[in-house]
């Protein structure tokens, strides 16, 4: 009998803590792992969900967990399905830069994120976008920013008033990533 595929969710008290219960309830065969301390087995994973949080506050632990970052990068490269929101998206990038230095992340997405005090800028509000005929809704709340030119979005994101906002939605292989925290996956 074939093993049932599962949904694997990154969860940690702070670095990957922003998870809507509705999203957990909509997924099947859910398991959790802590990217700071556990190397996930991704062989039977149908979806890897990297929710938001504050990875920039736990960079030393995330950098030390190099085997976890490598496993996630390899999963993405072989076509594994990943949804990454805000902190999860930051974790998939090449690096996060703070006032203390540069910290390598998973390297799935070819971007740097700045969490330096001089670069902090509040991005806040309800968001919606349509992708592949499906409407997504969520919210955005962060101070970090992309370094240099932001990525080109695969779709236009709108605020609650229906006005376009510059929040990019990134697609790479089977990875969907954005600063938007989705209400429903």
Image: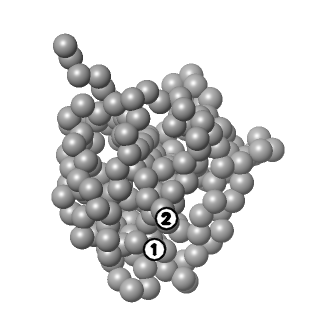
Spot occupied by residue 170 in the image (x, y as percentages of width and height): 45, 45
**Disc on res. 72:** none
Measured from the top left, where is residue 51 in percent x and y? 48, 50
Q: Earlier in the sequence, mark 1 or mark 2?
A: 2
Give x and y (percent) for residue 79.
26, 34
Q: Residue furthest right?
A: 161
Residue placed furthest toward the top: 1
| Vertical side of 46 occupied by 84: above or below | below
Quadrant of the frame with the N terminus: top left
**Callout 1: helix, strand or loop?**
helix
| Callout 2 secondary element | loop
**Horizontal and vertical percent position of residue 26:** 53, 29
Residue at 24%, 70% in the rendered image: 64
Return the residue at label 2: 14
Q: Please report the residue visible at 20 percent of the width from the left and 35 percent of the height from the top.
A: 43
Q: As displayed, is residue 47 above or below residue 177?
A: above
Question: 148 or 7, which is in the foreground?
Answer: 7
Residue 174 in view (yes/no)? no
Q: Nearer the viewer, mark 1 or mark 2?
A: 2
Image disc number at residue 57: 1
């Amino acid at each position: 009998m074939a093993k049932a595929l599962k949904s694997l969710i990154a969860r940690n008290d702070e670095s990957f803590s922003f998870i809507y219960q509705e999203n957990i309830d909509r997924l099947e065969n859910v398991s959790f792992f802590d990217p700071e301390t556990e190397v996930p087995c991704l062989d039977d994973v149908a979806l890897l969900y990297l929710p938001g949080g504050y990875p920039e506050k736990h960079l030393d632990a995330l950098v030390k967990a190099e085997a976890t970052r490598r496993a996630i990068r390899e999963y993405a490269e072989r076509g594994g399905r990943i949804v990454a929101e805000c902190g999860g998206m930051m974790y998939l990038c090449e690096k996060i830069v703070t006032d203390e230095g540069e910290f390598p992340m998973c390297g799935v997405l070819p971007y740097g994120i700045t969490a330096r005090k001089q670069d902090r800028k509040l991005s806040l509000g309800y968001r919606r976008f349509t992708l592949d005929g499906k409407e997504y809704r969520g919210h955005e709340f962060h101070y970090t920013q992309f370094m240099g030119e932001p990525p080109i979005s695969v779709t236009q994101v709108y605020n609650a008033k229906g006005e376009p906002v510059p929040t990019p939605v990134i697609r790479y292989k089977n990875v969907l990533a954005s600063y938007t925290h989705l209400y429903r996956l």
